[in-house]
Amino acid sequence: MVVVLNRNRSSFRRGVVLSVFLLFSRLFSISAESSDVFVPEQSVVSTNKLRAGMTGYMLTVLKGTKPVRLPIEIVSVISQRGSIKNSVMIRMLPSEKNKIGLAQGMSGSPVYVGGKLVGAVAVGWDFSDHRIALVTPIEDMRGVFSRPDRMIDLKGVDLKGASFQSADEDLPPDSLVLPPSSLALPLMVGGLSDRAVAGLKTTLNVPVEAAPYGASGELPLNDVRFFPGEAAAVLLAWGDVEMAAIGTVTATSKDGRFLAFGHPFLGWGAVNFPVAHARVHETVFSQAFPFKIASPVALAGTVTQDRPAGVGGRMGYFAPSIAAAFAFKDADVPDERVVKNFRVVSDAFLGARLLNGIYQGLIDDQWGRRGQGTATVTLRVEGRGVTQGWTRTNAFFSDVDLGRTAVMEPALIMEMLLLQPFKEVFPIGFRLDVSVTQEPKVLLIEDVVVSSDANPGDALAVEVTLRPWRRSPVKKHFEVVVPKDATGSCELIVRGGGTNSLSQLAVDGGWKSIDSFERMLTEIGAADANNELIIELLHDQTGEKTDKDSKKSVAELLPEEKEFLSETKTRRIKEGTLRISRSDYVVEGLMKRLINVSEDSDSGSK
């Protein structure tokens, strides 16, 4: 990657091809609360010693993995305001090895004068002289480590609950394994639809570009350390979906740390982003700006700092990641099923946004269309705190854009789980199973038949007429029970789960609060689903009120105001006033019936 400055405004661009790879995270117990001063293994020279006309060289990879020397000369030292105190302007001199000049992907390429390190190539200009570049001095880049790392320490954590069985029985069990400015930096994405790429640009508030995509198998861990001038890939997502940027290593230290890029990746501060050795396939000329095409070849460590002067990290430390799987089936195409496995960085505030865009992009890409349709979606969660796994299935219909509609609820749930305040959930994994059809699989509630008179305690037969879209209606039969304390009249409500959904009265009213991770999972699971037909019998439990009743006592609260939704549903199903029937259709509509309840308590029950 290299930062490219337009003559009128700053922009950041680069080209990269990324390969498919899987990672089994190596977990180390490394302190995350302190950072030492970065001391380069290479001798350095201060900017106040530089003069126009001095010559030297830069190290970068033009093809393959071996850096080459390209001659340069110092043009000027330009004073800056901000965390970067100076920029060094250089000119690339004629070379038989490189006739196109500066290229995207050279960001971080170390520049030497008199055999001593000056800093990292960082900035060039669109549609200009591609021999001219700005260098971020090493004295400013060392400040990347002036703030503490926040490396993930999973010492003592049982990882067994964070693994998945394969999303496809034909795949081996380890096919899914466990283990962001200037903000204008483009993020290269492979394996997703164009719409998802555009959506990620808005969601992440950074420029995002589609990249060519090719599979090269599993990407191994590599204990071989980085060396200055080598190509490096910083990753946000990897596997069957990839999001990354290619740059160059600037400097290393004896304690196993490295500096690269000479400018931010996402400007995210203290991070845990995997970094890999990369192979450059070719350096390509462009009048706008030349660029490198490159692929990662082996994991080398983790970027722990993403700051204005560059990125820095540790070699040999491999942070855990969020494991993810996507299983897709088009019900209109028999015997066809696609499984995708990938990972995203284990960042609570970034991970959910990445997953949202990725899953939507995968649906678009695999379905090959946009528009109306019905989807049955199952989200499964496994990991720390959910060792037995947690699953929610729902159905969605859209007459405009099914791909977008289908991921809205799963994305919200993943965001809630990653951002919840109760406890650390890494390692964690998500799997989304999606089955789609262009057919409107919708059941419309057309009629309800029930007796208009009843006694307390009676069991009432309810007949519900449901009409599938443009098909003959079907009748379903249920039974509800009139509460023994019911008087006057009861209201029978028959509705689809997505219509007038039952709410958390106790939580919404301020009588209770979600106070644990486990409770949050339970209440998310208790929410009504679109594929549910819900029959409920309601009666007045409060009696007539006067102005004096404006202040309630605890005893006067409705049962629902003292219970979580999951508890309310369990109680009402047991007493017979609530019935829930599930299907693979979206149920729409709402109908009501009034039932007169006799006050004669001696009438008995039917």
Image (cartoon, rainbow, N blue to C red):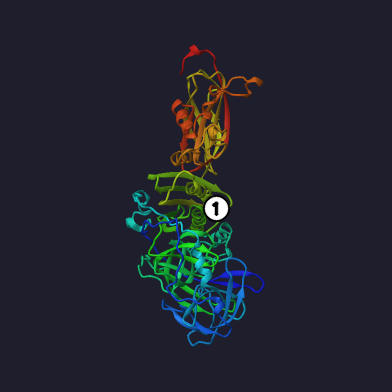
Circle 1 Cα neighbour tier, 10 Å, few/some/many (<14 / 14–19 / ≥20): some
Tell me how many marks there are: 1
Vertical arrangement, residue 399 with respect to residue 199, above or below: above
In the figure, 39 relative to 470: above or below?
Answer: below
| Residue 444, above or below 570 | below
Q: Residue 123 versus residue 200: which sits nearer the camera?
A: 123
Find the residue positioned furthest to the left: 172
Residue at the limit of the structure toward the front, as seen here: 48
The one of 11 and 74 positioned closer to us in this rendering: 74
Q: Is residue 12 left or right of residue 351?
A: right
Amino acid type, mark 1:
Arg
Residue 213 in the image: state x and y as whole percent.
46, 68
Regarding residue 241, the answer to whether it shows in the image is no
Residue closer to the observer: 445 or 82? 82
Q: Residue at x 50, y 38 (%)?
A: 528
- Is residue 408 something that shows in the picture? yes
Q: Which residue is mark 1?
A: 404
Query: Could you say which is closer to the camera, residue 289 or residue 102?
Result: 102
| Residue 244 at x, y percent in the picture | 48, 65
Please provide percent x and percent y for residue 249: 46, 72
Q: Which residue is rendered at x = 40% and y = 45% of the image?
A: 385
Q: Residue at x 54, y 44 (%)?
A: 469
Q: SS at mark 1? A: helix
The percent coordinates of residue 408 (x first, y second) are 53, 49
